[in-house]
Image: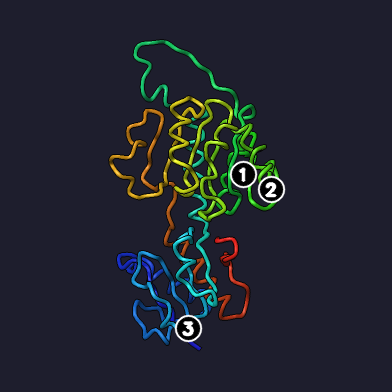
Amino acid sequence: MTANVLFAGRADGWPTYEPLLKAELARRGVEADLRTGFAPEDVDYIVYAPSGPVSDFTPFTRLKAVLSMWAGVEKIVPVVPASVPLTRMVDSGLEQGMTEWVVGHTLRYHLGMDTHIRGLNGRWHRHVPPLAKDRHVTVLGLGALGTAAAKALAALGFQVSGWSRTQKEIEGITCHAGPEGLKAALRQAEIVILLLPDTPATENTLNAETLALLPKGAKVINPGRGPLIDDAALLAALDSGQVGHATLDVFRVEPLPPEHPYWAHPNVTVTPHIASETRESTAAEVIAENIRRAEAGEPLLHLVDRSLGY
């Protein structure tokens, strides 16, 4: 039986995704009709992005699954019916891209590279950084992306701690969980990296109280979600010197408005949501594999737990 697959991502992504998805489905022996338009009642699977054409799922009466092209699902969970399985995007390209960005900015802070990039203004000022083994780095969020970044940093020799809402065991990483675990993880975090999902439970994870737990002058790196940080509290911590610098890739409002104080703050680096991106070639592999699994009655990969919001 042929599975009808509706591509409901951005229109400009279709020319790239079409041949990749068709090839990956064929490689797995899945008979599928892949299009950008069907009668809703005939659709079995939706390859979905909120930026695409579908906003109302009510007419899709025989859906077997919605396969998100995005890693974050906070905008997707509220609109996809609870009765329809929903998966989020976790793929090797997304992990690799995020790991490279996180490691790059961690090393930038660790080595004090900004001092030399901005220039010493004629002063021969030698500051030799510690070795990685003497630097504490904490990763908040130990899902696929957080785990990949934490392992890469541990492989470079950093003392890496991680925190998650539920207890994890990851070789080479000191894992914490729960409210007290968050405090323990932050107290030694010379560099803290946020890779948590955006849920009501994670909003303002870094706030006035938790920022005060950091060692004075700690660095903050946020490629996760904008609402993870209380912006006013972070700005106050930057002004007081409690936080030495912040590199922020995600924000509550994007694009970040020109008048936002982050742009002008001397101790903030803004990057325009580029830490990682879904790569079409590796995303197509994950999407095709989930369609194969659904057709074969096997468990789906990266199924969203709606009670947790990710």
Side (left or right) of 152 relative to 223: right
Please say if 11 is above or below 269. Answer: below
Residue at image mark 3: 3
* Discs 3, 1 touching: Cβ within 8 Å: no
Rounded to the nearest angstrom, the CA distance separating label 1 from label 2 is 8 Å
Q: Secondary structure at mark 3?
A: strand
Which of the two discs, 3 and 2, labels the residue nearer the N terminus? 3
How far from the left and from the top, in percent, is residue 170? 69, 48
Side (left or right) of 156 relative to 106: right
Please tell me the numbered disc located at residue 151: 1
Q: Secondary structure at mark 1?
A: helix
Around disc 1, counting alpha carbons within 10 Å, would you say few (fewer than 14), some (14 to 19), or many (20 or more)?
some
Observer-nearest of 186 and 303: 186
How far from the left and from the top, in percent, is residue 54? 37, 73
Q: Secondary structure at mark 2?
A: loop
The image quadrant that residue 50 belongs to is bottom left
Rounded to the nearest angstrom, the CA distance separating label 3 from label 1 is 38 Å
How far from the left and from the top, in percent, is residue 210? 57, 37
Residue at image mark 2: 170
How far from the left and from the top, in percent, is residue 119? 36, 20
Please say if 184 is above or below 131. Answer: below
Q: Amino acid at mark 2?
A: Ile
* Discs 1, 2 touching: Cβ within 8 Å: yes
Q: Amino acid at mark 3?
A: Ala
Q: Amino acid at mark 1?
A: Lys
Which of the two discs, 3 and 1, labels the residue nearer the N terminus? 3
